[in-house]
Image (spheres, rainbow, N blue to C red):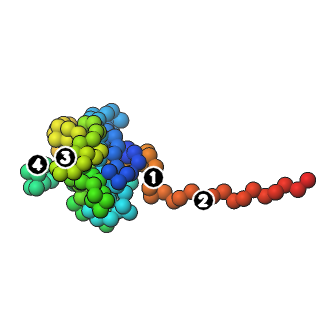
Amino acid sequence: MNRLVIDRGNSTNEGTFGEAQLVNPAGVVLWHGDSLELPWRNNAHMISCVPAGVYRAHVIFYAHMNRNVYELESVPNRTDCLIHPANWAGDVALGFHTDLLGCTGLGYGIGLIAPPGKAAQQAILKTVDAIDDFMAIAAHEPIEVEYRWVGVDPTAPAPQPAPPAEEVLA
């Protein structure tokens, strides 16, 4: 089964940006692009990116966008986690714009663009082209999607301070 690997960078208030690769079972890269998700917000429904892990995904028709998209299966405490076109994924509680409610966007490139009526913010570019290419190469077959942190993992326990060094008596 082919696997979409999402290597996430750091999670910021403007979103969680990363690199995405669709690889076949032999490890051959079939497609490469960029990824975008919401900031990490403790897996809260509709405001957080997906927890790290491996999920199966299948194609569904998403009427809201009038297109086929992939839907993740068995995301803990979540539903409706899709892979679809999206430019922005900021924290709306902090005034940023988002096109995502817990889903993943794919694109080609990252840059600053202004959402309607707002200041420019980090965004993923050429998302419709990327999704169209990805869907064609994935051939609408079931896939696995692996999310992993390559930047700072916000779910990792905070490092504990080192205990004070004991004084050496001479």
Question: Distance from label 4 to label 2 (Cα)?
Answer: 48 Å
Q: Mark on residue 160?
A: 2
The residue singled out by tag 4 in the image is: 67
If you read the primary sequence from the N terminus, does the residue marked by circle 3 or circle 4 appear first? 4
Q: Mark on residue 6?
A: none
Vertical relation: 81 (above or below) 8: below
Q: Nearer the viewer, residue 8 or 133?
A: 8
What's the amino acid at mark 1? Answer: Asp
Q: Position of residue 124 (x, y in %)?
A: 26, 42
Question: Distance from label 4 to label 1 (Cα)?
Answer: 33 Å
The residue singled out by tag 3 in the image is: 85
- Which label sits in the foreground, 4 or 2? 2
In this orientation, does residue 161 appear?
yes
> In what element is the residue under mark 3?
loop
What's the amino acid at mark 2? Answer: Gln
The residue singled out by tag 1 in the image is: 153
Do the residues bearing badges 4 and 1 touch, measured as CB atoms within 8 Å?
no
- Seen at 33% across and 45% down, the residue is 17
- Which label sits in the foreground, 4 or 1? 1
> In what element is the residue under mark 4?
strand
What's the amino acid at mark 4? Answer: Arg
Q: Residues within 10 Å of mark 1 (few under 14, many from 20)?
A: some
- Which label sits in the foreground, 3 or 4? 3
- Seen at 22% across and 51% down, the residue is 118
Q: How many marks?
A: 4
If you read the primary sequence from the N terminus, does the residue marked by circle 1 or circle 3 appear first? 3
Question: Distance from label 1 to label 2 (Cα)?
Answer: 15 Å
